[in-house]
Amino acid sequence: MTHFSRLLLCFILVSFNSFSQKEHKASFQVVPLGIKGGIDEKNLSAYLLAPSNSKDFICLDAGTINAGIEKAIDNKVFKVSTSEVLKKYIKGYLISHAHLDHVSGLIINSPADSSKTVYATEKCMEMMENHYFNDQTWANFGDKGPGFPLKKYHFQTLNLSEETPLSNTTMSVKAFPLSHVNPFESTAFLIKNDNDYALYLGDTGPDSVEKSDKLKTLWTAVAPLVQSRQLKGIFIEVSFPNEQPDKFLFGHLTPNHLMTELHVLEELAGKGSLNNFKIIITHLKPPAKSIAKIKEQLKNQNNLGLKIIYPEQGKKIEL
């Protein structure tokens, strides 16, 4: 091989390596503060999400806050105090629905928190104001609603499918309705930063059981982003194993129903579009044997080539 050929080969390898690193560079960082549904009050749905180069996090649901931050500090994800993460790193909360396992951390930690925005759709915000921050169940730390508003939190109602900037971050969000024991509504949040996206779904039942088209509508909206590889991952719940009868799902998914729904998404986005696509499984309900069964069933039914991720409390994930 000539000297020129060696130089050319080195240039090609360096260029390819640089391109590969750029291709695989993470767009978002995720710190799970709580990952389960059910009875473990120290580990309920809450996920911090920020651009990979930022400490400006939005909290997706808020079932567990303090215990999750402490776990993340133990895991060396954060090198500051629990109070500093709560007050300075978390810039706001996106609440998918007002069930207690998705809001209890927000409520309990509100006296120690700093001023920031709580985002939710109209029905969810009404429940938050009327049933929690109402000066009876809990002090009204918001800027509207019953009693005496302390104005620590700005309560911002999201209009469905309308892009809304997330204050003190470079991110924005669009909200989409989900059916969670029809007609009760939950919410999916499509978060955007630059040209990258992440999709978080609150609790949801399958369209077939909920007699709804809400998931089909959501898949239709995000299919082009899957196609273009701009959507970096989907957070979606699987609460029960396949043995759970449909009449006892209570607005949740099983592995069977999840895979059926993701096949709909693949049909819309194109064959093979979900190969190696990141699916973050949320809201697994104890007991441990049910969780183990869910994981085994998803492994066996994964005929789309999905990269299935099971988050661990306090351990960072990159998307």
Image (cartoon, grey):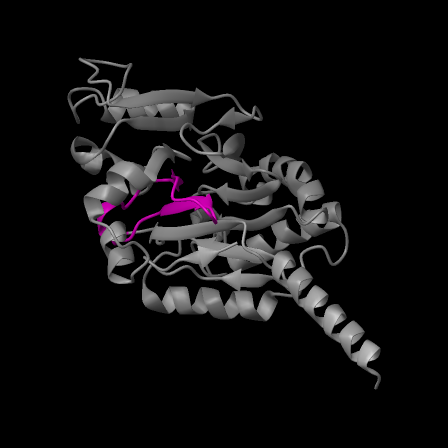
- Can residue 304 be seen? no
Compared with 65, 95 (above or below) is above
- Can residue 139 be seen? yes
Residue found farthest to the front: 3
Quadrant of the drawing holding the N terminus = bottom right
Query: Residue 194 colored magenta?
Result: no
- Residue 277, picture quadrant: bottom right
- Residue 129, picture quadrant: top left
Q: Position of residue 257 (x, y in %)?
A: 57, 53
Number of numbered discs overlaid on the protein picture: 0
State the extent of the magenta-drawn residues as a range: 39-67
| Residue in the foreground of this view, choosing between 11 and 110 | 11
The residue at 65%/57% (across/down) is 23
Q: Position of residue 231 (x, y in %)?
A: 61, 46
Residue found farthest to the bottom: 1
Q: Position of residue 162 (x, y in %)?
A: 56, 23
Left or right relative to 118: residue 196: right
Left or right relative to 45: residue 109: left
Compared with 52, 124 (above or below) is above
The residue at 19%/18% (across/down) is 150
The residue at 51%/31% (across/down) is 172
Left or right relative to 175: residue 72: left
The residue at 45%/41% (across/down) is 202
| Residue in the foreground of this view, choosing between 18 and 101 | 18
Q: Position of residue 199 (x, y in %)?
A: 54, 43
Left or right relative to 291: residue 254: right
